[in-house]
Amino acid sequence: MKRWIAKGVATCVLAACAAYTTGALAAPASPESVERMLAASKAEALLDGMRPQLHSMMQAAAKQASQGKPVTPQEQKIFLQFMEKTSAVIADETSMAKLKPMLLEIYAANFSQEEVDGITAFYESSVGQSLLTKQPAVIQAVLQGMPQRLAGMTEKLKKLDQEMRVELKAVRESAKPDSPPAADKPLSK
């Protein structure tokens, strides 16, 4: 009986080791296959689509920075020049030419050749192409629904914050001594 248990444990240990080393020894993805995957997933188009959103976020941040105060024509000119320059920096720094070396390294470090080939096959399939075609509309719908979702969440968080403040106040007040501490008196003998 002990032999059967020992054999079972040994078999489990060997199987676990084999599974671990198989994953650890999987062939890393080649740079060429990662490039093919990036092309199949339309990664460059995704980057291109992000730039207008980044630009809009920067405009909103700049508008918020003015704190609703009116902007003079001279200030407006400076603001527009700033936005043009920042848009150029964003376009340059998020170009596929600049990001590709980093992406190749990251994907090769995190995915095996088999995984990259599988991902590429998916994106090249009709279902993968459907995902790529429909994903922008899905993302846009999610973004449009977020303000309403966040508004409800904000109200819940405000209520929780108020409840916590009441509890903290009660704890602090109960920890206060009822009377001021007595002056230091020598201990009586």
Image (cartoon, helix red, strand yellow):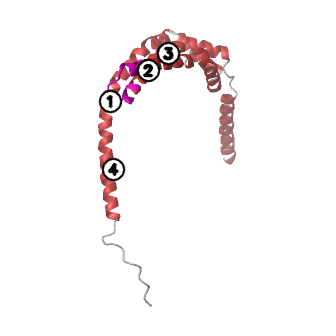
Mark identifier at residue 164: 4
> On the image, numbered disc 3 is attached to which residue?
46
> On the image, numbered disc 2 is attached to which residue?
78
Crowding near the residue tagged with mark 1, few <14, some 14–19, many ≥20 C-alpha atoms within 10 Å? few
Label 3 sits on what residue type? Leu
Q: Nearer the viewer, mark 2 or mark 3?
A: 2
Image height check: is 120 above or below 59? above
Label 2 sits on what residue type? Ile
Marked residue nearer the N-terminal end (4 or 2): 2
Secondary structure of residue under mark 4: helix
Mark identifier at residue 149: 1
**Distance of label 2 from label 3 (alpha carbons):** 30 Å
Marked residue nearer the N-terminal end (2 or 1): 2
Is residue 41 visible in this depiction of the protein?
no
Crowding near the residue tagged with mark 4, few <14, some 14–19, many ≥20 C-alpha atoms within 10 Å? few
**Distance of label 3 from label 4 (alpha carbons):** 42 Å
Whether tag 3 and tag 4 are in contact, CB under 8 A, the answer is no
The answer to whether residue 82 is magenta is no
**Distance of label 1 from label 4 (alpha carbons):** 23 Å
Whether tag 1 and tag 4 are in contact, CB under 8 A, the answer is no
**Distance of label 1 from label 3 (alpha carbons):** 25 Å
Marked residue nearer the N-terminal end (1 or 4): 1
Q: Which is more toward the observer, 90 or 24?
A: 90
Residue 74 in the image, given as x and y percentages of width and height: 39, 20
Marked residue nearer the N-terminal end (1 or 3): 3
Label 4 sits on what residue type? Met
Residue 28 in the image, given as x and y percentages of width and height: 68, 23
What residue range appears in magenta?
A: 62-78
